[in-house]
Amino acid sequence: MYRVSRVETSARLALVSCTRASYNPATMISKLHHEPQRFHRAVNRQRLLDTAQRLIAIHSPTGAAGAACECLAQILTEDGFNVERVAAGHAAAPAVVVRYSSGKPGRTLQFNGHLDTVHLPFVPPRVEGNLLRGSGASDMKGGTAAAIEALRVVRETASLAGGAVLLTAHDLHEAPWGFGQQLDQMIRDGIVGDAVLLPEPLNDRLPIAGRGAATWKVTIRREGAPVHEVMRPANEPNVIAAGAELVQRLGQLSQRLAQPVDPVAGVASVFIGQIHSGEIYNQYPQEGWLEGTRRWLPGTKREQVEREFREILTELEWATNTTVAAEFRFIRDAFALDPKDRLVEVFQQAHTAIVGQPLPLGPKPFVDDGNSFCALAGIPAITHGPRAGGQHTVNEWVDIDDLVRIASLYATIAVDYCGNA
């Protein structure tokens, strides 16, 4: 994730104003083809909470979420759903796929969640008042449980007049341990709907644009053995000086990236988060490395981003007489969502009916699987999840009442999106 810049904040505030002015809540409610309160009453809060706790209770660091996937498959089988297991290049944790169809023509809405968590000490689930805590509570086992409950509600109310709901859950989401490889393969294999909802913990805006992201690690080396700094040969290449030169050159790149400004996503960026070199204070180091991120705007090709970065390194290598190597790891591509898309319209109608007003349009401040659905499948994806916090820490939490809201919201959207062309 990254902090929203002043440019992005200004753009978002402007969008908040124009968005709220352009929607009429009363009109939105009248457009719905069903009664949202019916779905809210159908949500089983305790069942939802039990599902979330069962998933959180299983330690599932990225790359090793097999047991969590098996747990979810068992839960859905117990509920009477036909569960498919799809390896998608990761046999250690086959993804979970459920298709619930009305048997009639219509769109397919996909609920997608990841069951892996970042590599931090495991925290078991516990309930404190209205909060559910534990590893993955906010990112994103809680939201996934809410999506599961929405699927149950759609089936139990027999409200789906057409189309289908597709539920998918998988591993290999969290970087740097995974880079979305399993989901990407599922998309290439055609396991996609016509649109996607993702219950990541973002709910103060409807994200319609977001930057792509990659991580990079540059290693700078010189020839020769370790040596005391007073004994080093004349004109010996200096890896620390080369690293400082790289910092300067990336600073110049950062200045160039300040333009153009996307009205929603903000600006592209290059960021340095780590610099390391040397073993002790007076040993002339043989190696140093820097690590950071590169983010780009919608409309920019990721191949162009990597090529530009590597050209800087080639010039650095020549100028400093060092050997420069780089790992450039693509995470997710940039995305843009058409504000006039049918999914956006249905989402805003349902959100207004349940909450009382539509969401302002704005940027997505992080990359998630929605970026992949947009880039690889070309389908609209909305990230919207429960009120939650502590992502990527040992203090994750999610608001239980808001899990209920997400379940009823997703059910409402599914019925109107799938069954009403």
Image: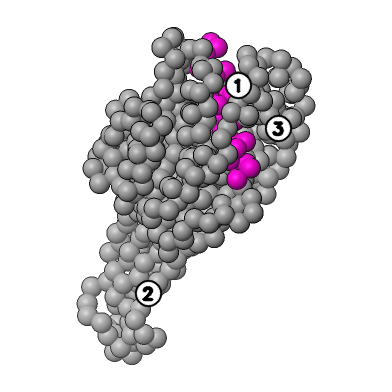
Q: Is residue 191 above or below residue 270?
A: above
Q: CA distance from mark 1 to mark 2?
A: 54 Å
Question: In this image, 83 relative to 142: left or right?
Answer: left
Instruction: Tell me whether circle 1 and circle 2 mark residues in contact (CB < 8 Å).
Output: no
> From the viewer's perspective, is the residue at label 1 or at label 2 nearer?
1
Q: Amino acid at mark 2?
A: Ser
Quadrant of the rendered structure where residue 129 is? bottom right
Q: In terms of secondary structure, where does tag 2 sit?
A: strand
Dot placed on the residue nearer the N-terminal end, 1 or 3: 1
Quadrant of the rendered structure where residue 119 is? bottom left
Task: Write down the residue under mark 3.
Answer: 355
Which stretch did the figure color magenta?
400-421
Residue 146, how many percent across, how many down? 52, 37
Q: Residues within 10 Å of mark 2 (few under 14, many from 20)?
A: some
Q: Amino acid at mark 3?
A: Val
Q: Is residue 145 above or below residue 389?
A: above
> From the viewer's perspective, is the residue at label 2 or at label 3 nearer?
3
Is residue 283 among the parts visible in the rendering? yes
